[in-house]
Amino acid sequence: MLFDDGTADGQSDAHSIALGRVEGLKELVHDAGLEAHADILHCQAHTIAFVAFSSDEELPRTIVHADHRVRSIAEQVQDDLLKLDTIGCDERKIVGELRPEHHPMSLKLAHRQRNHLARRLVQVHRFRREFFPAEERSQSHDHLGCAVGIANRSPRCLARAVDVWRISGQHPQACAGVGNDARQRRQMNRNLFEYDDLVPIDHCFRSDAVDYSKLSRDCQIDFEIFRHHLEYEIWSEENTHPFEEDPRVYNNYVSDGVYLLLTQSTLPVETNIANSIARMALIPGVIAAARQNLHNPPRAHTETAIRQNRGAISFYEQTIFEAAGKTRQPGPLKEAAAATVACLKDYQKFLENDLLPRANGEWRLGSEKFARKLSLELDAGVTADEVMTNAETEFDRVERDMYVVARQLWSRYFPRQPLPPDDADGRNTTVQSVLDAVGREHGRAENLTRDMRNNVDRIKKFITANDILRLPDPDHCQVVEMPEFKRGNSTAYMEAPAPLDPNGNGHLAISPPPNDWDAKRMASYLEEYNSHMLEILAIHEGYPGHSVQLQYGNRNPSLIRRVFQSGVYVEGWAVYTEQMMLDQGYGRGDLALRMNQLKFYLRAVANTILDHKMHCSNFTDDEALAFLTRRCFQSEGEARLKIIRAKQSSCQLSTYFVGRMAHYQLRTRLERELGDKFDLGRYHEAVLDPGPVPVKYLPELVRARLAKPR
């Protein structure tokens, strides 16, 4: 079976870690000499694996379309585990450093004082030596049982060497029902945000025992990915302050921490409900931290947080009971939800009446920070200026292609009307007129989710019939209507099954227009996401885009790759599949479908240009609006949402174009090399097999996979 589950050893726990959803947790904890109760694995707030979530919460990284955005590991962590497992810390100390033996690099953090939700807090315990044959080197700091050695064995060993670290200080709610009454009583007397026995995780990992030259190539790549992620984390820690400047961070804890338990986890329903109740009890602490920490956030961030919090209130008032279904705990669930609603309504007043009037923070990164962050985000060996130059060149090419297609469609939509003049203004008029006409071919707002399901079914049949690749079997993706508290930044997103719970549900979510929109705004939305565009969106988000890629990725044996996903690879693959599917015959040459595919790709290229101009110059909202509506043919509503998103997600918008070019160029190169031996389905599976790695590794990994049987 192609999709053999690559997980090993113990049973996966869907919600048992902070960064990476550690596999084989039960066995590893037992072998590490730690207490291992079966019930503890189902307490959602007590275990954690390496490197806590990214400090850049602007970078939302599951997969989303705001079209859509890729959410960072940071957000996956929040989604699956620590949404409500918030811990506070006033001090950060250097207790170690990352200093690879064969790399001239040393990463340290300076002492810093902060009073916000901690992001890197763990205590390391000693593992049994047979797991990590590399030398274990102790550290003198009281919080560390040992440094973690990295094994020179299979690719899986690197991930397991940094696999499972456990928080020694647990929330009282996490101890409930695990037979650990003594600890629970101790914890009940501790403040939720005072965990003085925890250590910043950035400083807990040491790799000076690693002989890089003796690692297998797969292990070397994993090591480099992990090292790069640490470097990015440290830069983000020193240059961004999301817990003080972005109220959306707290909204993620409040909503997804419960929603994903009830909709994705494969644990028993009653266990998930009990854990949800326990998490809801922590929400007042999250809100208290938000009130204390938020000072001068950007206005766009705050306005989005206000809309999202309204959605969270609606979720706890009604949707949570639909998600929970029939339960043996209706009373406690209703009580917890009612308390949460009261807390969030009070928080809503704070956001609207206190925080918003003073939300005047700066959202622009500036050229220097943007260039450095983009380099870290892409990890592709290109500079910000090179990316911008390439994007502008590609933008001109796609514009020309759109005009060629628009000329062929002109007589279909405008019979007997002369084609506008073939000059700059006339070409723009031709393209815009055809797009407007094509856009009027749309469904009804209340049928968007149904239409998306139909598109998915049709596309999957085409993929199988034409051997585009072998689809996941079983397929865990469900097409759903987007929950209200997730709306505001995207029209659609893909929320894949968790890496440690690959048999859980994945959600391809589509957002209907709000009911309070007037007829004109509703029509504009439906014309933007017309019947043809919905098909492109289904390809990108679902098949063979994100849903397929992420399910392939979940089977990769490397925990490092499953956790530290490259947004460039992920988004680039999805954009690549849009054109590829039409090139292979999907849509039977329908030029209206091709026109929307080109428009969608132009949007990806424009994202890069907008990203650069918004953060590296004084590009105004009016200038951005003119660029998006006149040059990119976007509706005003869509364009305004994109401007907001550009302010909130610096550098992420550039991943679409850079990733697509990397995938497209690799395909071209290998197809030339292999000639008649090139097999498209086999090639696609070879691209997906290594997992979502930085694109600079793809040429060697794909060639290696193609050398093996399919």
Image (cartoon, rainbow, N blue to C red):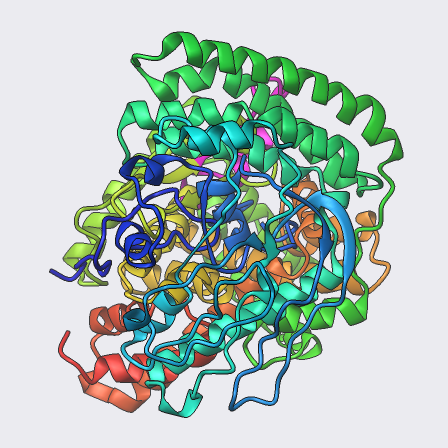
Of residues 472 and 331, which is closer to you in this image?
331
- Up/down of 341 relative to 12, above or below: above
Boundaries of the magenta span: 510-533
Location of residue 131 by image quarter? bottom left
- The residue sitting at 82% across, 48% down in the picture is 622
Of residues 518 and 693, which is closer to you in this image?
693
Residue 525 colored in magenta in the image: yes
- Up/down of 158 relative to 334, above or below: below
Give left or right: position of 619 versus 458: right
Can residue 487 be seen by looking at this rendering? Answer: no
Relative image position of residue 347 (x, y in whole percent): 71, 22
Relative image position of residue 1 (x, y in whole percent): 11, 60
Give left or right: position of 217 versus 651: left
- The residue sitting at 29% across, 13% down in the picture is 326
Relative image position of residue 381 (x, y in whole percent): 57, 81
Location of residue 136 by image quarter? bottom left
Give left or right: position of 530 versus 291: left
- The residue sitting at 36% across, 78% down in the picture is 667
- The residue sitting at 48% across, 59% down in the picture is 124
Residue 682 colored in magenta in the image: no
